[in-house]
Amino acid sequence: MSNAISRRDFLKVTGAVGAAGLLAACGGGSSSSTAPAGPASVAEPTGDAVELSISWWGGESRHEAYQTAIAAFSEANSNITVNPTFAAWSGWEDTMSTKFAGGVAEDVCQVNWNWLYNYSGNGQTFIDLNTVSDYIDLSQWDEATLNTCVVADMLQAIPVSMTGRIFYWNMTTFNKAGITEVPTTLDDLMAAGAAFQSKLGDDYYPLHLGGYDRMIMMVFYLESIYGKDWADPATSTLNYTAEEIAEGLDFIKSLVDNHVIMPLPTYYGNNGSTAAHQSNEWITGKIAGILEWDSSASKYQDALDEENRPGFTVGEEIKFGDYNGGFTKVSMGLAITQTCQHPAEAGMLVDFLLNSEEGASIMGSECGIPASKAGLAAAEAAGAVDELVAEANSKVMAFCAFQLDPLFEHNNLKADGTGIYQEVFDTIDYDGVSGAEVVDILLDGMESVGYTINA
């Protein structure tokens, strides 16, 4: 019997008490349900000394880009001081949800698209950015792109970029296993699993998928087979039956059984809660593939050691059935909170980061390929668009055909270690059960966050 700990249990022990205390201090876990009155004009900048705050998550290169751009903004606007707060993604949504609940979030927040629904469904947390259109040039975004961030008839965020998932491969390891081409079919994946095990050993795997990654891969597979969105993008009504979902869960199990992906107990035993790109297995090439966001290409390449880095390759999307599976979404947005005392100046900061020649050239593609036309032009002219990210993004946008609903990324579902997705896939790996035996756990969890289930 394995002595590996469950990542879900690990994070429950280390994080639950602290999170509960924070929520209690703020008086609950959700923002007020009372929306503000309609949009109103904001006060014009006075030129007086102003302090703004901004928050974001990301890796070291994103942190550096934001801080450099903020310094340039303050140099150009000497009366405005900007105080940043930032960290890695792990635990970040819990931190921000607590701040949103307590009305203490930063003036400008980097946000996930679904946060607009989860924490500001009535417009109670973020302002309507149409009220600061004198300071943010909204014409730089296509109307359809802006409309993805309209919630409660308010433009609650500016899309920084659009994104989707794609495969990244370490061809250094694939070559050691006698494979010279990136996988493009399910048969290729299964053959790679067998080759890795027989030629490299039991501790080498062609692909790694964490709990949330497995959920995305499963939906990708089902969309390829059945040709329909996971759920209605407007109503979050599930489009799949329990039997179809059980089939998808069994597909993931087959990847484990055929040595394509590392069993979760093995990964947890070796790494605990460590992110995949920071794991020794990824760094040294024992895990030779990942299904990740297109904006993460450089992060995964840079994490590899000197022997393996030259083999990093942006793969192709895999067509598992008659349809192109996979969804695209707003990668992230910038929003201004209702508690911001200087929304005009906050708007100026957002515009500088996303639209201005100086700011956009500094930010480059650190948050994905810019959705702003002016921002993209500035970043490209400065040579600041990462070629790997651009390659990955172009492949995603050309292939993925489906839409994401706002509940799919609900924190109760996707949270590392404590979410329903993690529970489902942990149960499959630890107990060896079939998809039919755990599908109700998934459906009950989805229903609990607001999905309409007709399965």
Image: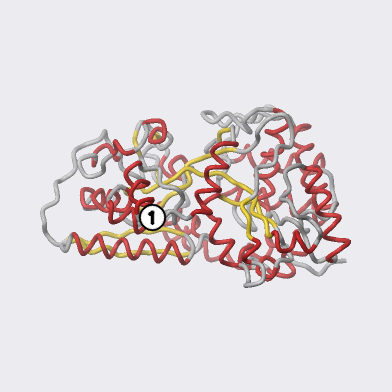
Task: Look at the image and tell me whether residue 118 can be seen.
Answer: no
The residue drawn where x is 83% and y is 65% is 200
The residue drawn where x is 50% and y is 53% is 387
Where, quadrant-wise, is the C terminus in this rendering? Answer: top right
In the rendered image, residue 245, in percent from the top left (x then y), is placed at 74, 36
Tell me the amino acid under the disc marked 1: Gly
Left or right for 432, reference 304: right
In front: 123, or 300?
A: 300
In the rendered image, residue 180, in percent from the top left (x then y), is placed at 75, 55
In the rendered image, residue 54, in percent from the top left (x then y), is placed at 33, 58
The residue drawn where x is 43% and y is 49% is 111
Where, quadrant-wise, is the N terminus in this rendering? Answer: bottom right
Q: In the picture shown, does residue 126 fall above or below 169?
A: above
Q: In the picture shown, does residue 164 fall above or below 451?
A: below
Left or right for 218, reference 144: right
Quadrant location of residue 106? bottom left
In the rendered image, residue 20, in percent from the top left (x then y), is placed at 52, 60
Count of marks overlaid on the render: 1
By what rule are the colours in the image chosen? Answer: secondary structure
The residue that mark 1 highlights is 102
